[in-house]
Amino acid sequence: MRVLLVDDEKELVATLAERLALRDIYARWACTAEDALKAVDECEFDVAVLDVKIPGMSGLELKKIMERKCPETRFIFMTGHGSEADFKTGVAEAGLHYYLVKPVKLEVLVEKMKEVLQNEGEAR
Amino acid sequence: MSFHLRLKPKFWDHYDVAAGPFKHLFDFRRMWRQAVILTAAVSIMPLVLMALIDYNIGRKAMNSEILLRTSRLVSNTRRTVSYFLEERKAAVEFVIRDNSYESLGNPSRLNQVLGNLKRAFGGFTDLGIVDPSGRQRAYSGPYELAGADYSGQAWFEQVMDLGVHISEVFLGFRREPHFVIASLHGEPDGSGYIVRATIDTEIFQELLSNLEISGEGDAFIVNREGVLQTPSRFYGKTLEAIPLAVPPYKEHTQVLDVAGPDGVPLVMGYAYIQNTPFILMICKQKPKLMEPWIQSQWEIFWFLMVSIAAIVVVVLWVSTFLVGRIFEADQKRVATLHQVEYSNKLASLGRMAAGVAHEINNPLAIINEKAGLIKDLFAFKKEYAADPRLAALVDAIIGSVERCATITRRLLSFARHMGGEARVGPLRMEDVVEEVLGFSIKEASYRSIEVDFEVADDMPEMETDRGKVQQILLNLINNAFAAVSDGGRLEIRVEPVEGDRVRISVSDDGCGIPESDVGKVFEPFFSTKSYQGGTGLGLSITYGLVTELGGTIGVESALGKGTTFTIVLPVKLKPSGGERNACAAG
């Protein structure tokens, strides 16, 4: 499983990536939308974990661009806001089913990532 | 409560501290005063004006009526008196023409003539024949006047000059008031004689005393010096001077307003009787004449007074009622403003809480991951295998982060429903109560307050506005916490009731509410905690919110034993009229 972590908090994504690596999961991270898009050039990721708000654009916009580039990639959203409104818009506009509220337990994150890959067909 | 206090309207002592520069707009006492003065003036002024105009016109009409009537009476009486005198003058003339000097000189003939005159005309007392030297040649009558000498007397001189004469009333030889009609019969040769008749003043008086005169009237005759020729009712006997000024000579009848000798205003009509020394005068007392009219004016006056009193009562009542209504509306407006301010405050508080929670979530996530990494390192790398105490410390950090996360999540979830637009959605009442209680649980434990929360098993899922339910519960639970003392007890019970309703009761064993205040707790600005910073709006806003959700709220309290607030809410909130219309239009 290859994972891309995108969040404006470098410390958070870097630590998360390191912890995933310890569990033999390939993880890269980006702090801006620009960096994230550069990273997905090769479409090497199975799952992208995006913050709802990323400097440069919103998580949902980034998801749309990345989906066009790499239709195989699945998405999980993270939010510090826990806002129902955001969640509902997300579901309506982008078929957003996977959604975690910060702070996240690593075990929960790993489980969600597995779930997202298993439900590949149903997610749409 | 005294009568005075019960009459005093609510707005009387109202003082709007917050009105600022628009204070005059909320001076209800002034508003009331203006309303009373203006309406009373507008309704009473025309009435008073009409009454005054009526009074003036009436008085003038009455005055001219009196003058006219007096004038007519004087004219008629003058004609009667003149006619009476003319008649007697003509009778004397007839005697002269019908009889020769010789036959009149015969006493028996003279007696016969006097008898005829008395019978035919009346009023004649005696009859005498006077020769040009002034000596009475023949006399018929009750007195011994034959041979009396009249030369040198004024009447004799005048009759010799003018041929005819009517004298003033005088006493003469006989000491009885009488007057004389004398006529000269002149012969072409210069000789001649005078026929002199004396007229009894009694018949003269009868003419006047038979008059019916209104207003304590008095009719009499004076001579040109103001000496009474007939007795007067009020101004003296015959031959006494009247205490009134003799009016100036006028050809026609005159009526004057004069002051009587005792100051009573009089209406005086007079007429100079032509070719005689007589002036006919009729005096009426003005106040007596005006009496009936004054009487009717009194009736009008009382009617006016009663009308004014009725108008004043109605004006006072209407003004008090209307200004009271305005006051009530204003109080509602102020309460609504405060409520809006309150929900705004709540909304900003919600936004702030959400912002803070969000901001805290990010560093929390980092702490979480860093601590997780340390733990991972202990687990995955042998070289870090260390003191188990370190692992425990890391676990403690992660545990605290978890606790913080619970708080921020609860805050976010709560803030989401605070303020903002109304959103009706499904909710479980027990969850909302738990959530609200979550904020107070620490306080409860610090103050050792026992919180007993009971939920019935068969609670239905409700569909209503979560934000409002939160506010209602928050207000009631906060109130309960404020009421109980440390170590007290709080009981919250949630259960379904008949008619698809849910009852929530919040009881405390705190100070309770005095019986006199129980009815007022839902009124805006009623507060027992004002010195502790209470606005007195909490329960009034709660009441408003419960009403908006289609529910009812009640309170039971015993002083010193505690208070129970009971809310009954419908399970499903019926859409309000406005929304229904919008749907129909769509």
Image: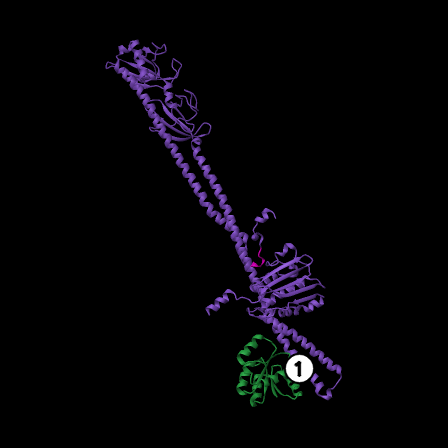
Query: Which residue is at 71% across, 86% downward?
Result: B379
- Pick the front one: B362 or A2: A2
Can residue B558 be seen here? The reply is yes
B300 shown above or below B177: below
B573 shown above or below A37: above
Can residue B135 be seen here? The reply is no
Q: Where is residue B242 in the image (x, y as percent from the top left)?
A: 42, 24
Three-letter amino acid code at disc 1? Glu
Chain letter of the residue beneath label 1 in the structure image: B
Q: Residue furthest left?
A: B188
- Reading the image, the residue beneath label 1 is B369
Chain B as rendered: colour: purple
Q: Is residue B42 left or right of residue B357?
A: left
Circle 1 residues within 10 Å: few <14, some 14–19, many ≥20: many
Q: Is residue B165 left or right of residue B341?
A: left
Q: Position of residue A81 (x, y in %)?
A: 60, 76
B450 shown above or below B304: below
Region rendered in magenta? B15-20
Chain A as rendered: colour: green
Q: Position of residue B223 (x, y in %)?
A: 38, 22
Determine whether the residue tagged by mark 1 lies in a helix, strand or loop: helix
Figure quadrant of residue A108: bottom right
- Pick the front one: B509 or B176: B509
Q: Is the magenta stretch mostly helix, strand or loop?
A: helix
Q: Position of residue B484 (x, y in %)?
A: 69, 62
Figure quadrant of residue B256: top left
Query: Which residue is at 52% across, 53% downward?
Result: B323
Query: Which residue is at 60% across, 47% downward?
Result: B2
Residue B278 drawn in magenta = no
B32 shown above or below B489: above
